[in-house]
Amino acid sequence: MKNQIKINIFKKHIFLFLIFYAFSSLFANQPPDWYLNKDFSYPSSRYISVIGEGTTLKDAENQAVSGLSLYFKTNSDIRNEVIREFNEVIQDKNTNFSKKTGIKESAIITSQEEFLGVQFTSPWFNQYQSKYVILAYIDRANAAEIYKSKINNNILLIDSLHSSAKNNDNLFYKYRDLKKALIIGKLTEELIKSAVVVDSRQANLYSKEISYIRNIEKDFSYYRSKITFNVEVKSDREGRIKRKLLQIIEEQNYITTSGRGEYSIICSINCSEEKYDSGLFVRAGVTVKILDKKNNSLFSYNKTLPRNGHKTLEGAYSVTFREIEKDLENYFISNFHSSLGI
């Protein structure tokens, strides 16, 4: 009898424990207030907010940030490209731009979330749907101040580059500095658009900055149009290398001319012939120089290519010149731009 009573008491305890556990689990998985009533927790007058869900926490965050991006009417891929170009400019090792302008590492924007000033709530795991849920939000007042600070800093950077361009006699260095100024200008315009979204009262606040960026664009177009090239190739075969160099230059939207340009591309090709039992071979050395009107060297490129063989000498030359074309296409313009910090 006593044993039966003990068993009944034990069963009762188990039953109560299960009930308690069920209620505890239910309570533990209660959704947060911002999930139940987002507009109350994060009113639109103070915040821009979006709830994201996903099978992983990162998926939930990405969905929330993508939703926020829709408020700013800019494709996230475009914005990320603008951020990438901006970071490349301020980290430019060729011209030590960061050191000269006193840019701190904190100026680098690591992500779109950072650009927009996005913050996240603590995540909630919805056990019933096996999904992570999170709310991404932008505090309008805080974001407006962040944008204002970044915009002002960017205008100072643009000023520095604009001043450098004005004080440089070399067209290419003018072009380089103005191109960087334009890249920073693009990011600044994105920041201004975002500032207006978070606070519509700022719609006319940045008209002066927008006008300044437009003037930079005009200066850039003007000096870009002044950069002209003529091409001369020594020891060419049927004009192949000259045509390739003209194509490379024109693909970069530079202007070529049959007369004397502001810059001359002088290319020399030196070939040596070798004969072996396996066939005839040609080894080529290529030198390319870019000179200004005063014959000052702006850039030089030297390359000795591996020998190329064929059963006939003409065939060996044909293969060799094809390899010269490929080499110039792959390395010439990229090395030139890199040397100038473009």
Image (cartoon, rainbow, N blue to C red):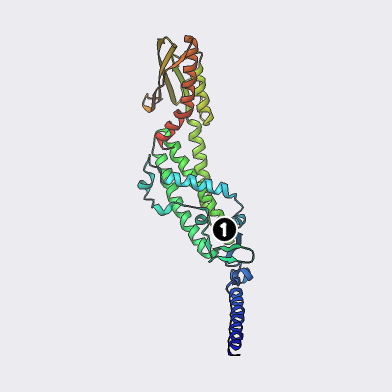
Q: Please count the marks in the image.
A: 1
Q: Count residues near mark 1 (Cα–Cα under 10 Å), then give few for <14, some for 14-19, many for 20+.
A: few
Image quadrant in which the C terminus is located: top left
- Kind of residue at badge 1: Thr
Location of residue 16 (image quadrant): bottom right
Q: Label 1 belongs to which residue?
A: 56
Q: Is residue 225 above or below residue 98?
A: above
Give me the residue at 51% from left, 50% from top. Answer: 188
> What residue is shown at x 43% (from left), y 53% (from top)?
107
User: Camera-side residue: 25 or 229?
Assistant: 25
Relative to 56, residue 25 above or below: below
Quarter holding the N terminus?
bottom right
Where residue 127 sits in the image (x, y, percent)?
Answer: 61, 66
Which residue is at a point 36% across and 43% down the rendered structure image?
96
Position of residue 323 measured from the top left corner of the image (x, y, whole percent): 47, 21
Residue 328, compared with residue 161, is above or below; it is above
**For this rendering, which residue is in front, 76 or 279?**
279
**Residue 258 seen:** no
Q: Position of residue 324 (x, y in %)?
A: 46, 21
Q: Position of residue 178 (x, y in %)?
A: 46, 40
- Name the residue: 49% across, 56% down: 114
Q: Which residue sits furthest bottom?
A: 1
Tell me the SS state at disc 1.
loop
- Residue 62 visible at all: yes
